[in-house]
Amino acid sequence: MLAVFDVSASMDFDAPGGVRRIDVAVDAATTALAVFPDHARIGLWEFSTQRGPGGRDWAVLEPIRRLDSVVGGKTQRERLGQRAEEMKDSTDGGTGLYDTALAAYRYAVQKYDENYSNSVILLTDGSNDDPGSISARMLLHRLRALADPQRPVRIIGVAVSEDADLAEIQRIAAATGGSAYRADTSEDLLRVFAQEIAGR
Protein backbone atom coordinates (compact mmCIF):
# COMPACT_ATOMS: atom_id res chain seq x y z
CA MET A 1 0.00 0.00 0.00
CA LEU A 2 1.14 3.50 -0.84
CA ALA A 3 -0.61 6.08 1.36
CA VAL A 4 -0.76 9.52 -0.30
CA PHE A 5 -1.96 12.34 1.96
CA ASP A 6 -3.10 15.83 1.06
CA VAL A 7 -1.20 18.42 3.13
CA SER A 8 -2.55 21.52 1.39
CA ALA A 9 -3.44 24.55 3.50
CA SER A 10 -7.12 23.60 3.65
CA MET A 11 -6.22 20.48 5.66
CA ASP A 12 -5.83 22.94 8.56
CA PHE A 13 -9.59 23.58 8.48
CA ASP A 14 -11.73 22.04 11.20
CA ALA A 15 -13.39 18.68 10.73
CA PRO A 16 -16.49 17.64 12.71
CA GLY A 17 -15.61 17.71 16.40
CA GLY A 18 -13.42 20.79 16.16
CA VAL A 19 -10.17 19.05 15.24
CA ARG A 20 -8.23 19.80 12.06
CA ARG A 21 -8.69 17.64 8.99
CA ILE A 22 -5.00 16.76 8.98
CA ASP A 23 -5.24 15.61 12.60
CA VAL A 24 -8.21 13.39 11.74
CA ALA A 25 -6.33 11.85 8.81
CA VAL A 26 -3.04 11.28 10.64
CA ASP A 27 -4.61 9.97 13.84
CA ALA A 28 -6.69 7.44 11.90
CA ALA A 29 -3.68 6.39 9.84
CA THR A 30 -1.46 5.83 12.86
CA THR A 31 -4.21 3.83 14.59
CA ALA A 32 -4.58 1.64 11.51
CA LEU A 33 -0.80 1.31 11.18
CA ALA A 34 -0.65 -0.52 14.50
CA VAL A 35 -2.98 -3.21 13.16
CA PHE A 36 -1.18 -4.07 9.92
CA PRO A 37 0.98 -7.21 10.17
CA ASP A 38 4.77 -6.93 10.04
CA HIS A 39 4.94 -8.42 6.54
CA ALA A 40 2.69 -5.67 5.09
CA ARG A 41 4.48 -3.34 2.65
CA ILE A 42 3.54 0.33 3.12
CA GLY A 43 4.95 3.64 1.89
CA LEU A 44 3.96 7.26 2.55
CA TRP A 45 3.82 10.37 0.36
CA GLU A 46 2.46 13.85 1.03
CA PHE A 47 1.26 16.37 -1.54
CA SER A 48 0.10 19.93 -2.09
CA THR A 49 1.70 22.25 -4.65
CA GLN A 50 5.42 22.92 -5.02
CA ARG A 51 6.01 20.26 -2.40
CA GLY A 52 8.94 18.25 -3.71
CA PRO A 53 12.20 18.68 -5.65
CA GLY A 54 11.92 20.57 -8.93
CA GLY A 55 8.58 22.06 -7.93
CA ARG A 56 6.69 18.79 -8.18
CA ASP A 57 3.49 18.42 -6.17
CA TRP A 58 4.47 15.42 -4.05
CA ALA A 59 7.21 14.42 -1.64
CA VAL A 60 8.24 10.86 -0.85
CA LEU A 61 8.34 10.55 2.93
CA GLU A 62 8.98 6.80 3.01
CA PRO A 63 9.20 4.42 0.04
CA ILE A 64 7.27 1.16 0.11
CA ARG A 65 8.94 -1.31 2.47
CA ARG A 66 7.89 -4.14 4.77
CA LEU A 67 6.85 -2.82 8.16
CA ASP A 68 9.50 -4.92 9.87
CA SER A 69 12.30 -3.59 7.66
CA VAL A 70 14.92 -1.68 9.65
CA VAL A 71 16.39 1.53 8.20
CA GLY A 72 18.54 3.89 10.23
CA GLY A 73 17.92 1.91 13.39
CA LYS A 74 14.12 2.16 13.13
CA THR A 75 11.53 -0.18 11.69
CA GLN A 76 9.44 0.97 8.77
CA ARG A 77 6.43 0.99 11.11
CA GLU A 78 8.23 3.43 13.43
CA ARG A 79 9.42 5.58 10.55
CA LEU A 80 5.91 5.81 9.10
CA GLY A 81 4.45 6.80 12.46
CA GLN A 82 7.04 9.54 12.89
CA ARG A 83 6.62 10.85 9.34
CA ALA A 84 2.85 10.88 9.69
CA GLU A 85 3.05 12.99 12.84
CA GLU A 86 5.36 15.43 11.05
CA MET A 87 2.69 15.99 8.39
CA LYS A 88 0.57 17.75 11.00
CA ASP A 89 3.02 20.66 10.92
CA SER A 90 3.61 20.81 7.16
CA THR A 91 0.27 21.95 5.74
CA ASP A 92 0.70 24.58 3.04
CA GLY A 93 -0.12 25.36 -0.59
CA GLY A 94 -2.84 24.24 -2.96
CA THR A 95 -4.08 20.82 -4.02
CA GLY A 96 -1.82 19.25 -6.63
CA LEU A 97 -4.06 16.24 -7.10
CA TYR A 98 -3.71 15.19 -10.75
CA ASP A 99 0.07 15.05 -11.12
CA THR A 100 0.34 13.37 -7.72
CA ALA A 101 -2.28 10.72 -8.52
CA LEU A 102 -0.49 9.81 -11.73
CA ALA A 103 2.97 9.70 -10.15
CA ALA A 104 1.75 7.63 -7.20
CA TYR A 105 -0.03 5.13 -9.43
CA ARG A 106 2.98 4.80 -11.73
CA TYR A 107 5.23 4.18 -8.71
CA ALA A 108 2.87 1.59 -7.22
CA VAL A 109 2.70 -0.29 -10.53
CA GLN A 110 6.50 -0.31 -10.70
CA LYS A 111 6.66 -1.64 -7.12
CA TYR A 112 3.98 -4.28 -7.75
CA ASP A 113 4.44 -7.51 -5.79
CA GLU A 114 2.31 -10.50 -6.76
CA ASN A 115 2.38 -11.75 -3.16
CA TYR A 116 0.37 -8.76 -1.97
CA SER A 117 -2.81 -6.86 -2.65
CA ASN A 118 -1.44 -3.67 -4.22
CA SER A 119 -3.16 -0.32 -3.77
CA VAL A 120 -2.78 3.44 -3.48
CA ILE A 121 -4.75 5.22 -0.75
CA LEU A 122 -5.29 8.74 -2.10
CA LEU A 123 -6.70 11.09 0.54
CA THR A 124 -7.70 14.68 -0.22
CA ASP A 125 -10.04 17.39 1.03
CA GLY A 126 -10.21 19.33 -2.22
CA SER A 127 -9.98 19.17 -5.99
CA ASN A 128 -7.05 19.86 -8.26
CA ASP A 129 -6.07 23.55 -8.25
CA ASP A 130 -2.61 23.35 -9.77
CA PRO A 131 -2.87 25.32 -13.03
CA GLY A 132 0.32 23.75 -14.35
CA SER A 133 -0.79 20.14 -13.98
CA ILE A 134 -2.11 17.71 -16.54
CA SER A 135 -5.83 17.84 -17.26
CA ALA A 136 -8.43 15.55 -15.70
CA ARG A 137 -9.01 13.94 -19.09
CA MET A 138 -5.31 13.24 -19.61
CA LEU A 139 -4.97 11.87 -16.08
CA LEU A 140 -7.74 9.33 -16.64
CA HIS A 141 -6.29 8.39 -20.03
CA ARG A 142 -2.84 7.77 -18.55
CA LEU A 143 -4.17 5.85 -15.55
CA ARG A 144 -6.09 3.51 -17.87
CA ALA A 145 -2.99 3.08 -20.02
CA LEU A 146 -0.89 2.16 -16.97
CA ALA A 147 -3.46 -0.28 -15.57
CA ASP A 148 -2.30 -3.86 -16.18
CA PRO A 149 -4.57 -6.84 -15.41
CA GLN A 150 -1.43 -8.91 -14.84
CA ARG A 151 -0.16 -6.39 -12.27
CA PRO A 152 -3.37 -5.07 -10.67
CA VAL A 153 -3.04 -1.93 -8.57
CA ARG A 154 -6.14 -0.08 -7.35
CA ILE A 155 -6.52 3.52 -6.27
CA ILE A 156 -8.69 3.83 -3.18
CA GLY A 157 -9.85 7.44 -3.09
CA VAL A 158 -10.85 9.11 0.16
CA ALA A 159 -12.71 12.42 0.06
CA VAL A 160 -12.31 14.27 3.35
CA SER A 161 -15.07 16.82 3.98
CA GLU A 162 -17.76 18.23 1.69
CA ASP A 163 -15.12 20.43 0.04
CA ALA A 164 -13.60 17.40 -1.67
CA ASP A 165 -14.88 16.57 -5.14
CA LEU A 166 -16.08 13.03 -4.50
CA ALA A 167 -17.27 12.54 -8.09
CA GLU A 168 -13.80 13.43 -9.37
CA ILE A 169 -12.13 11.10 -6.89
CA GLN A 170 -14.54 8.33 -7.93
CA ARG A 171 -13.53 8.78 -11.58
CA ILE A 172 -9.84 8.62 -10.71
CA ALA A 173 -10.31 5.46 -8.64
CA ALA A 174 -12.57 3.81 -11.22
CA ALA A 175 -9.93 4.25 -13.93
CA THR A 176 -7.82 1.72 -11.99
CA GLY A 177 -10.60 -0.61 -10.89
CA GLY A 178 -10.63 0.97 -7.45
CA SER A 179 -13.28 2.67 -5.34
CA ALA A 180 -13.84 5.94 -3.47
CA TYR A 181 -15.30 6.92 -0.13
CA ARG A 182 -16.39 10.02 1.77
CA ALA A 183 -14.79 10.22 5.21
CA ASP A 184 -15.19 13.17 7.57
CA THR A 185 -14.15 11.66 10.91
CA SER A 186 -11.46 9.36 12.25
CA GLU A 187 -14.10 6.65 12.57
CA ASP A 188 -14.98 7.01 8.89
CA LEU A 189 -11.33 6.74 7.90
CA LEU A 190 -10.73 3.76 10.16
CA ARG A 191 -13.59 1.93 8.43
CA VAL A 192 -11.87 2.50 5.08
CA PHE A 193 -8.52 1.30 6.43
CA ALA A 194 -10.18 -1.70 8.12
CA GLN A 195 -11.78 -2.69 4.83
CA GLU A 196 -8.38 -2.53 3.15
CA ILE A 197 -6.80 -4.65 5.87
CA ALA A 198 -9.61 -7.21 5.71
CA GLY A 199 -9.29 -7.44 1.95
CA ARG A 200 -5.63 -8.45 2.02
Image: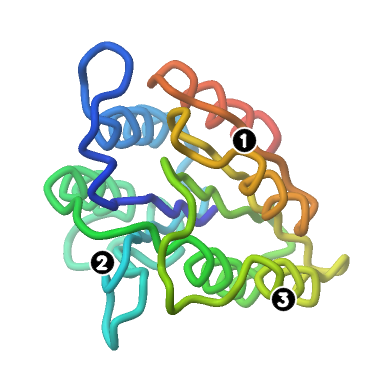
Q: Residue 71 carries which label?
A: 2
Q: Is the residue marked by circle 2 packed among few (<14), some (14-19), or many (20+) residues within 10 Å? A: few
In the orientation shown, which residue stands out farthest toward the right? 149
| Cα gap from disc 3 to disc 1, whole angstroms | 25 Å
On the rendered structure, is 183 left or right of 83? Answer: right
Q: Which mark is residue 142?
A: 3
On the rendered structure, is 65 left or right of 49? Answer: right
Looking at the image, how many numbered discs can be counted on the residues? 3
Q: Residue at horizontal 16%, vertical 53%?
A: 90
Residue that badge 1 annotates? 196
Q: Quadrant of the C terminus?
A: top right
Task: Return the residue nearer the eye: 66 or 90.
Answer: 90
Q: Is mark 2 on a helix, strand or loop?
A: strand
In the orientation shown, which residue stands out farthest toward the bottom? 54
| Cα gap from disc 2 to disc 1, whole angstroms | 26 Å
Q: Residue at horizontal 50%, vertical 72%?
A: 99
Q: Is residue 35 above or below residue 164?
A: above
Q: What element carries label 1?
A: helix
| Cα gap from disc 2 to disc 3, whole angstroms | 34 Å
In the orientation shown, which residue stands out farthest toward the left? 89
Q: Which of marks 2 and 3 is nearer the N terminus?
A: 2
Q: Toward which corner of the image does residue 33 lie, by quadrant?
A: top left
Kind of residue at disc 2: Val
Q: In this view, does 99 lie above or below 115?
A: below
